[in-house]
Image (tube, helix red, strand yellow):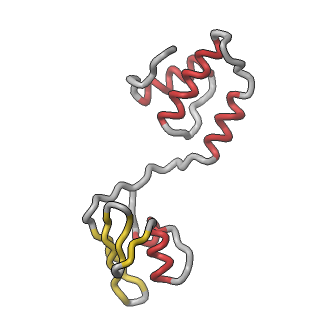
Amino acid sequence: MPNYTHLTARELELKWLELIAHPVPPIGRSLIIKYLVWYAQAKRGKISPLGLFHEVAQAAKGADKRPKATLEIGSKLIRSYQGLKYEVEIVANGYLYENTLYKSLSGVAKAITGKSWNGNIFFGVKK
């Protein structure tokens, strides 16, 4: 079985183009490697390659194309909203706001505004 884990992003893209002859869809590195291994096996006759791109396209629909923001534990996010200052601390298992633990920044944003928000947008968290 081929091992593609050591390849750079560019090498993976070239291998994809070589084996599959279509641009790489916007999916994560690990999924690209899995499909390359699967397709290499299919070319050797071990698996039927029919429907590969349908499966990849379906997987790509659910893939978030933007990298996730990484926030360090102990960091604080400060946001001014309607003239008031709000502070959220990043903790190991979520976000601490007014002595309440939230699983997501979106939950904190909703607690502050009363409306559903994308927490990263509300707090201005960038890539």
The reply, left or right, for residue 100 in relation to residue 64 is left
Residue 107: image x %, image y %?
Answer: 48, 72
Residue 53, how many percent across, how many down? 68, 30
Residue 64: give x, y in percent of width and height: 54, 49
User: What residue sits 54% from the left and 28% below the top?
Assistant: 34
Q: Is residue 8 left or right of residue 26?
A: left
Relative to 44, say whether 4 is above or below.
below
Farthest residue, direction top: 44
In the image, taking residue 77 as reference, residue 5 lies left or right, namely right
Looking at the image, the residue that sits furthest to the bottom is 83
Q: Residue furthest right?
A: 50
Which residue: 44% across, 27% down? 10
Dividing the picture into quadrants, the one containing residue 94 is: bottom left
Residue 125 falls in image quadrant: bottom left
Name the residue at 43% across, 30% down.
9
Q: How many marks?
A: 0
In this view of the protein, which residue sits in the foreground, 13 or 70? Answer: 70
Q: Identify the residue at horizontal 58%, vertical 27% (top origin).
A: 35
Assign the C terminus to one quadrant of the image: bottom left
Which one is nearer the viewer's eye here, 42 or 83? Answer: 42
Asked whether 100 or 55 is in front, the reply is 100
Image height check: is 105 above or below 58?
Answer: below
Res 74 quadrant in image:
bottom left
17 to the left or right of 30: right
Give coordinates of residue 16: x percent, y percent.
Answer: 55, 23
